[in-house]
Amino acid sequence: SQTIHQWPATLVQPVGSPLSLECTVEGTSNPNLYWYRQAAGRGLQLLFYSVGIGQISSEVPQNLSASRPQDRQFILSSKKLLLSDSGFYLCAWSKQGYQPQHFGDGTRLSIL
Amino acid sequence: GIQVEQSPPDLILQEGANSTLRCNFSDSVNNLQWFHQNPWGQLINLFYIPSGTKQNGRLSATTVATERYSLLYISSSQTTDSGVYFCAVAAYTGANSKLTFGKGITLSVRP
């Protein structure tokens, strides 16, 4: 069966520091991968999605970037964090085409 | 883009009661999912239901695609059902099932 892993689960970072969140999927190949952010008390917003290695689409302009160095690895990064980057970040995967998405457990990011 | 509206925004139930959660969407969809977000933030897949009716234990869901709405039914609610319920859809003309989420329905089940 397929599983998705995100780490770390919780992260506290100072303003201006870099960020790297990692997501990996097991048990499938060539998945679609997604990064979402959930601000406190709100719904989820799609940040990036990827249909293959090195292929990244950005949904909203922001201080973050994403990369997909391997088939089942998806990384969310920032060179300099802002206070507004605080939130709950979730990674998701789906099979190619119009298929349901499955979510990881998320990373709670606090910026001080 | 596609709009998703969920109602009611908040719901308080006594344990054992039944409830209906509604999701309206503004365009044809190729994907509709219901999720339960527990107090730890985990998003639990409840249903993948772009059309039709499905049941899983005390939960069932119905999507009427032609009328652009979906309903989630919870019967004999339990305190563990508490949390936020999200409906998410992907527009039919969109690529790769990019989901747009509603704002969620906060359910509190009291013992």
Image: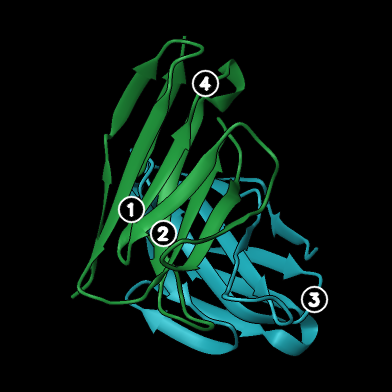
Residue wearing tag 1: A104
Q: Which chain carries label 1?
A: A
Residue found at x 53% / y 81% = B49
Query: Who is closer to the viewer here, B28 or A66?
Result: A66
Q: Determine if marks 3 and 2 fall on one subunit.
A: no
User: Chain B appears what colour?
Assistant: cyan
Residue wearing tag 3: B27
Disc 3 marks which amino acid? Asp
Question: What SS does tag 3 mark?
Answer: loop
Q: How far apart are marks 2 and 4 (CA)?
A: 22 Å
Disc 4 marks which amino acid? Leu
Residue mark closest to the camera, 3 vs 2 = 2
Q: Quadrant of residue B40?
A: top left
Query: Is residue A76 shown above or below B98?
Result: above
Q: Determine if marks 3 and 4 fall on one subunit.
A: no
Residue wearing tag 2: A92
Residue wearing tag 4: A81
Q: Which of marks 4 and 1 is nearer the N terminus?
A: 4
Q: Determine if marks 1 and 3 fall on one subunit.
A: no
- On screen, residue B41 versus residue A62, left or right, reads left
Q: Mark 2 lies on which chain?
A: A
Q: Determine if marks 2 and 1 fall on one subunit.
A: yes
> In the image, which disc is placed on residue A35?
none
Question: What SS does tag 1 mark?
Answer: loop
Q: Mark 4 lies on which chain?
A: A
Q: Which of marks 2 and 1 is nearer the N terminus?
A: 2
